Image: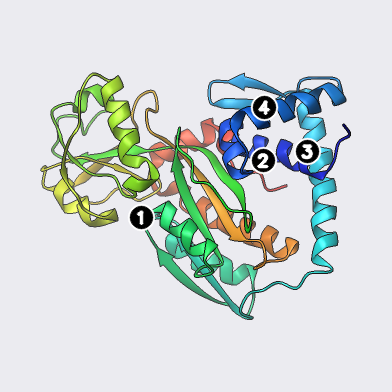
């Protein structure tokens, strides 16, 4: 067996996803099949490309050299294909979807900057699964989605994806008068007696992920409220409940937004698009626009900003 384009793409997806399991879902392969493929590639190249880390897998020195060359080759191949393929997207218009993140408003401006003269329609949807379905069925051209660690959303062959943030910690919001509000961080076990606002996108695994983490901490969460996206904020502010939140939102008045010790709730952010909607050059422009929109909001929460600067392995790969 020789090295071909799909092998180079698999290596790059593993690096971007941060784990073989997540990469397998993006590539529509089983985890054992991708692992076997990686081992064959390593045999051909004469060395190990990835090693296990606390957060998944990381490239070795050889892996970094291979990735650098592989990205150059893939860029050339994608550009070659684009020269002979016309993008099937309404001219002058991009339909973009996103889960409820702080960067939602910035996405419109950044995408418009990346595509001058283009209008942007935005759909904000708590369910990543519904966003992926909308892209699949041509209702959206692209979307920014979040997937909880340990869960996957299969992507069909008409879609492509690229990891934006491989490891994204979810914070907890409590009332400003809460007994834990003044702490630097919170143990999940300290929230055993709280009433919870259910997390958005339960069909994506967010609710199962919360229940699993709470059980590991020794309790069953009391999911008392079903409030989509930001609708749960008044319940938190009044002291009637706690909820998981995107850490890049500014801290709302009357609440405290804190990290969970040990990061028991981790998501992965992906940019997903229809292959026939953008050329290779346009996908690069789109990815950079989404990256910048996200980075615009990192300083919103000083606690998250400190985490961000301390964890460069979580940063987007834009070269």
Of circles 2 and 4, which is in front?
4
Give the Cα distance between marks 4 and 3. Answer: 12 Å
Of circles 3 and 1, which is in front?
3
Classify 10 Å Cα crowding around label 4: few (below 14), some (14-19), many (20 and above).
some
The residue singled out by tag 2 in the image is 13
Q: State the residue at coordinates (27%, 26%).
A: 214
In this rendering, would 207 be left or right of 159?
Answer: left
Rendering colour mode: rainbow
CB within 8 Å, label 2 to label 1: no
> Sequence order check: which comes first, mark 4 or mark 3?
3
Image spot of residue 160 (x, y percent): 63, 54
Of circles 2 and 3, which is in front?
3
The residue singled out by tag 1 in the image is 126
> Sequence order check: which comes first, mark 2 or mark 3?
3
Give the Cα distance between marks 2 and 1. Answer: 25 Å
Q: In the rendered view, tell whether residue 218 sits above or below residue 68.
A: above
In this rendering, would 117 be left or right of 99?
Answer: right
Q: Nearer the viewer, residue 157 or 308?
A: 157
The residue singled out by tag 4 in the image is 35
> Sequence order check: which comes first, mark 3 or mark 1?
3
Q: In the rendered view, tell whether residue 48 sits above or below residue 127.
A: above
Helix or strand or loop: what does disc 3 sit on? Answer: helix
CB within 8 Å, label 2 to label 3: no
The residue singled out by tag 3 in the image is 7
């Amino acid at each position: 067996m020789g090295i071909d384009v799909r092998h180079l793409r698999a290596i790059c997806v593993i690096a971007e996803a941060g784990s073989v399991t997540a990469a397998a879902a993006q590539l529509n392969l089983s985890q054992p099949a991708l692992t076997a493929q990686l081992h064959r590639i390593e045999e051909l190249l004469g060395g190990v490309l990835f090693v296990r880390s606390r957060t998944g897998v990381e490239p070795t020195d050889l892996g970094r050299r291979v990735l650098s060359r592989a990205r150059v080759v893939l860029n050339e191949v994608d550009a070659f294909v684009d020269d002979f393929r016309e993008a099937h997207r309404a001219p002058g218009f991009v339909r973009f979807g996103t889960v409820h993140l702080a960067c939602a408003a910035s996405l419109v401006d950044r995408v418009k900057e990346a595509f001058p003269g283009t209008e942007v329609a935005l759909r904000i949807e708590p369910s990543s699964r519904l966003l992926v379905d909308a892209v699949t069925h041509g209702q959206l051209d692209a979307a920014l989605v979040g997937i909880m660690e340990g869960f996957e959303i299969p992507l069909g062959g008409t879609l492509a994806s690229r990891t934006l943030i491989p490891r994204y910690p979810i914070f907890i919001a409590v009332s400003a008068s809460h007994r834990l509000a003044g702490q630097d961080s919170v143990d999940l076990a300290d929230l055993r007696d709280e009433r919870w606002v259910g997390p958005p996108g339960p069909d994506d695994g967010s609710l199962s992920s919360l229940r699993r983490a709470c059980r590991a901490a020794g309790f069953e969460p009391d999911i008392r409220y079903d409030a989509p996206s930001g609708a749960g904020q008044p319940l938190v502010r009044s002291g009637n409940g706690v909820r998981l939140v995107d850490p890049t939102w500014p801290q709302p008045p009357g609440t405290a937004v804190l990290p969970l010790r040990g990061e028991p709730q981790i998501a992965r952010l992906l940019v997903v698009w229809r292959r026939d909607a953008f050329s290779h050059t346009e996908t690069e422009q789109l990815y950079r626009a989404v990256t910048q929109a996200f980075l615009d909001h990192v300083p919103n929460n000083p606690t998250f900003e400190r985490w961000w600067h301390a964890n460069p392995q979580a940063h987007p790969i834009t070269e």
